[in-house]
Amino acid sequence: MKSYNIAVIGGDGTGPEVTREAVKVLEVAAKKFSLKLNFTPYDLGGARYLRTKEALPDSVVEELRGFPAILLGAIGHPDVKPGILEKGILLRLRFELEQYINLRPVKLYDERFCPLKDKTPADIDFVVVRENNEGLYTGSGGFVFKNTPHEIAVQESINTRRGVERCLRFAFEFARRRHKQKKLTLCGKTNVLTYAFDLWERAFHEVGQKEFPDIQRDYAHVDATTMWFVKNPEWFDVIVTDNMFGDIITDLGAMIQGGMGIAAGGNINPVGASMFEPIGGSAPKYTGQGVINPLAAICAGQMLLDFLGETDAAAAIETAVIKVTREKIKTLAAGKMGHSTAQVGDLVAGAL
Ligand code: IPM
Ligand code: MN
């Protein structure tokens, strides 16, 4: 029997409620596919920070490094200044565990959930490969003359040849394995960011031409990309982009696939500890009410199994999610599902 150790960080707000349902579904999948999943919970988040004044102890980072996969609920607490937990936990883990890919599938399961007129599941099925360790997220920059009238704030976008190439290679490989349109779109801003995206564009064509001649190369500016997401989402297969643009376009992607209730992503280190999470935040106002949608967390669990190589178990979870969303759920929005958080978990577990 294959056995996997999985760290579970419920985190803040509704994070623990949704991860509980994801674990419930993973346990059913494990039983069905004869896997052993050993879950280890970690108490991280705003409550712990307020209690201990420490967001993430070094020793915990080292422990987490030893897991093949981590399931994360949400990070963000109303009593902690914005930035502290995000940088101290989420971004620190993404960086220190070298999860250099943020993989965000955008897939519509039922046209009732799509805000776009006349778009169906056949039109909305693409994947964003977001660079996850560089760009504007490194924290590089600073102030000069802070709090004076001639204050200067600099925030630098870091793009290394190595970082860009490994991200591009992952994206090309992904497009090849996905075998859909076999097309990779670079989303950038070559007309304005003439240094950063010059490097991206050159590396894109060099790597593509030499190593992935079977994959069609396509380019779209980031502003146009948002337009196409709404107008012609069916044009996309796999999109690769930098950290900041990837952050922005995947919120729009989440909306066209039905909202934050269903959108999941994976912070991937192809050879290390990867971390899977619902894209939505900690939703403090819904905390403890049992009304938040756990499907995004369940889909994060599905991505986790897929990453571990348990593709049949992952596919079975997706089939169950599709069945439940199409047959049992009124809307994907919190409080309007027609079921509680735990009931949605039960429905998926039952369908599985
Ligand atoms: C996301 C989030 C994070 C990001 C925040 C919470 C730091 O928006 O995962 O998309 O910007 O990456
Ligand atoms: Mn985001």
Image (cartoon, rainbow, N blue to C red):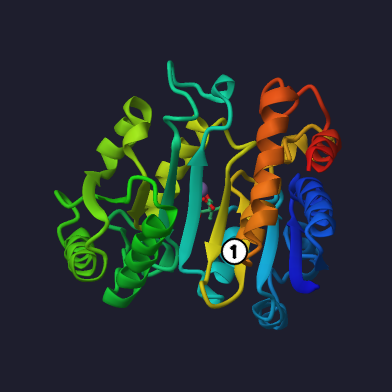
Q: Is residue 203 above or below residue 216?
A: below
x then y, percent, for residue 264:
59, 47
The residue at which mark 1 appears reads as: 307
Left or right, 95 with respect to 51, comes to left
Give the answer, above or below, for where 98 lies relative to 289.
below
- Judged left or right of residue 98, residue 49 is right
In this orientation, does residue 4 appear?
Answer: yes
- Residue at the farthest top position: 117
Note whether residue 146 is visible: no
Rendered view: 326 above or below 1: above
Relative depth, front residue between 221 and 312: 312
Name the residue at 80% across, 35% down.
344
Residue at 37% from the left image edge and 58% from the top image edge: 176
What residue is drawn where x is 58% and y is 32%?
A: 109
Q: Quadrant of the C terminus?
A: top right
Choose top left, top right, bottom left or bottom right for residue 293: top right
Side of 330 relative to 188 (left or right): right
| Residue 160 x, y percent position in the rendering | 29, 74
Q: Is residue 89 left or right of residue 205?
A: right
Q: Residue at x 70, y 50 (%)?
A: 77
Nearest the viewer among 54 and 229 is 229
Q: Amino acid at mark 1?
A: Phe
| Image location of residue 159, percent across then percent down | 29, 69
The image quarter in which residue 328 lies = top right
Element under disc 1: helix
Residue situated in front as seen by the camera: 226 or 344: 344
- How many numbered discs, if any? 1
